[in-house]
Structure formats: structure tokens, C-alpha cells
Amino acid sequence: MERIFFQPGPTTLPKEVLSRAKAEWDDFEETGLNIMEHSHRGKSYETVHDQAKERLKRLMDIPETHDVLFLQGGASLQFAMVPMNLLESGKKAKYALTGSWSEKAYKEASKIGQCEIAISGKDTQYRTMPSMDYQASDEDAYLHITSNNTIYGTQWPDLNIFSHPNLVADMSSDILSRAINVSDYALIYAGAQKNLGPSGVTAVIIRKDLLHENEKLPNILSYHIHAKNNSLYNTPPVYSIYLLNLVLQWVEEQGGVAEMEERSTKKAKTIYDVIDASSGFYKGYASLESRSLMNITFTLENSELEQQFINECEISGIFGLKGHRSVGGFRASIYNSVPLESCEKLAKFMVQFQEKYGK
């Protein structure tokens, strides 16, 4: 029986990527070594590193005004690095709170400098993205947003509503799933383990005028130092970047970001349609206008029925649907590597489960 997965992260990788990596496991391009055995200063790895950087630039149409960095520490390190590098004395960092990860980013930044909550969706238990009624002021160092919220299954439906001169975005869970105008952002960061590849590497896209030298910062925490050294200041996560490069190549071969966006819309609709047609048997967590195309969250009437749902899912070969403990229920994470066929199989199972247990 085929097994399908809706892992929240790390997610599954495209099968084509895994096959390529398997074929090159003990002999990368006839060198007799795995790529992670190569020196990060050598030509073999340097080619992979530069390919990944250029591919991301092409896929996202990143302008010459911005640089691409490959760093470590996940998005969680970026919660600290962003204010360390961008929050100047006398300025305030503003945060849009839309879920657990934006809360963590705000709390981390508050340890470093002055921070304020610009807007918040906490009063709706993060079911709805808040109204964007905040206006930038001269005291702002930057405005930080989280584009998609994996735990609650919400997403900013229109990123064009933000017009801040120094807009910072955590796009860890929906990067490459829809087209954006990179020029609108001062900085974008994304942990790789959702849409870019495996855990271990974080992509940072930063406007070059923000790459200031700061002698008070440890070198390892300085965007300026990492950019100056082409993300090779210290030994990079070689294998993670190698796989990231293969994932980016896969996205290109599939048709690029436009194709990923079209697929994401179809995949999400396949599951949301079942929820909406269930007459309340399946209860979506996120409000209609804030629904995520990456993480679909829903619950059932009681915990016993939810456990039965999980049990029968696994018998049917469907895994990874258990929701986050703070929300409960279920979460179908349908990142770029999850095929439409998997979503169709889940939708069919959901209809059959309702027919079996619905009143």
C-alpha cells in the first residue's frame, strides 16, 4: 500500500530529488566522494553553492539590490539576528502578531531593543489575520510579519497590503509557493525544511544597503560578514545546501513559482471543499478569509472521533495529520513537494469517514 505524508516540518522532499541524491550518494559527479565530504572551499562544493544562490535569484526574481545568504540556526536564530543587525538605537521594531512564531520573534527581539506590537490577531485565537491598519512612522526600524502560520493554518492572503519601507518577513512555510515582489522587502528569511529542502540551512534575502558593518556584533551574527564571505565565513551545512539546490532545480523543472502557486491553490481547494461541504462535521480552524494554502487545520466533534480518524487514516496509508497541541484536531501540511494526488486521496478518505460516522 502506498503511504502518503502531510508532515508539518520537516516535510517530505520531492521523490526526484531523493532519487538524484541517492544516485550521487557515494560518488558526486565522478569525484569518488559524497558532496559533504568535499571541502567547502573546493570547486565541487563552490559550484553547488553558487548554483543554489543563482537558482533562488531566478525563481524569486531577486533584484540586484538584494543579496542571498545561506545561514544556520533556523528561523529561530533569525528572530535574534534581525534586531541585532537592523534595530538601531533610538528606533523601535514593530511586530505583527499572527501566531506562535511571530510571538517568539517579538519576544526575542524585545531582549535586544525597543519593540512594539503593531497589530495582533491574538483576540481571535489567531483564527483570523488582523486588519492591516498600521501606518509606518519615523521611529520604526522595521515592521516584521510572518507570511504563513503553520500551527493555526492562516496566511496573509494579500502581501501587497504592506508598504513599510523596511518590511521584514518570515516566509519559512510558504516561500516559493506564490509570487512576491522581493523589492518590497528589506529582508526575507526562511528555514528550509518546508519548501526549500531539509533542515539545517536558512535562506536570507537582504537589501544590500542594510549590510552595515557593526564591530559590536560577533562576526557569526553579522549579515555584513556573511555577505562579505558569500555565506562561507564558517563551514556551511554542505549537504543541506546541496539538497536545497536540487529542490530549486526541481521547482524550475516543474514550471517555477507560478506553477507551484497554481498547484497550491488546487491542492488546498480539494481539501477545503470537503470541509465546507461537510455541514459542520469537519470544522475549519481558520476563518475563510485567512485560510492558508500550506497548512489546512480542522477539528472533529470530540477527541474520541478524532483519535478514530487518525487510526483509520494510518490504516489507509495516510500519515502526519495530527494537529499542533495548542490547536488540536488535524493539520494537513501541503507544501510544494506534496502532490495533488495525495490531497485527493485525503479528500476521498474524509468523505468516506463522514459517511461512516456522521450523524
Image: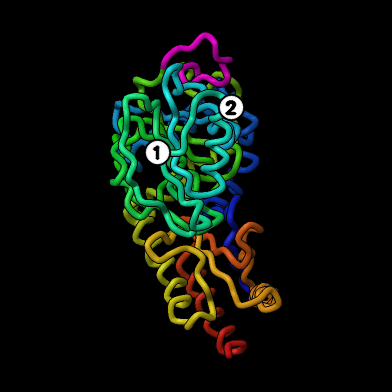
Q: Within 10 Å of the Cα at label 1, are there few (<14), some (14-19), or many (20+) other Cα atoms?
A: many
Camera-side mark, 2 or 1: 2
Q: Measured from the top left, where is residue 305 in percent x and y? A: 67, 79
Please identify the quarter of the rendering in which residue 92 is found: top left
For the residues labelled 2 and 1, the Cα–Cα distance comes to 32 Å
Amino acid type at mark 2 = Lys
Percent from the top left, x then y, of residue 25?
63, 43
Amino acid at pointer 1: Leu
Residue 283 among magenta residues:
no
Residue range corresponding to the magenta coloring: 212-226
The residue at the point 55 percent across, 18 percent down is 233
Name the quadrant of the N terminus. bottom right
For the C terminus, the image quarter is bottom right
Residue at the spot 42% in from the left edge and 22% down from the top edge: 91
| Dot 2 alpha-carbon crowd within 10 angstroms: few under 14, some 14 to 19, many 20 or more | few
Q: Residue at x 67, y 72 (%)?
A: 310
Query: Relative to 212, is 92 above or below?
Result: below
Q: Which mark is residue 182?
A: none
Q: Secondary structure at mark 2?
A: loop
Q: Position of residue 347 (x, y in %)?
A: 50, 76
Q: Secondary structure at mark 1?
A: helix
Q: Which label's residue is closer to the chain start, 2 or 1?
A: 1
Give the answer, above or below, for where 205 lies relative to 196.
Answer: above
> Where residue 111 is drawn, which disc sits there?
2
Q: Which residue is mark 1?
A: 56
Within the image, what quadrant is residue 139 found in? top left
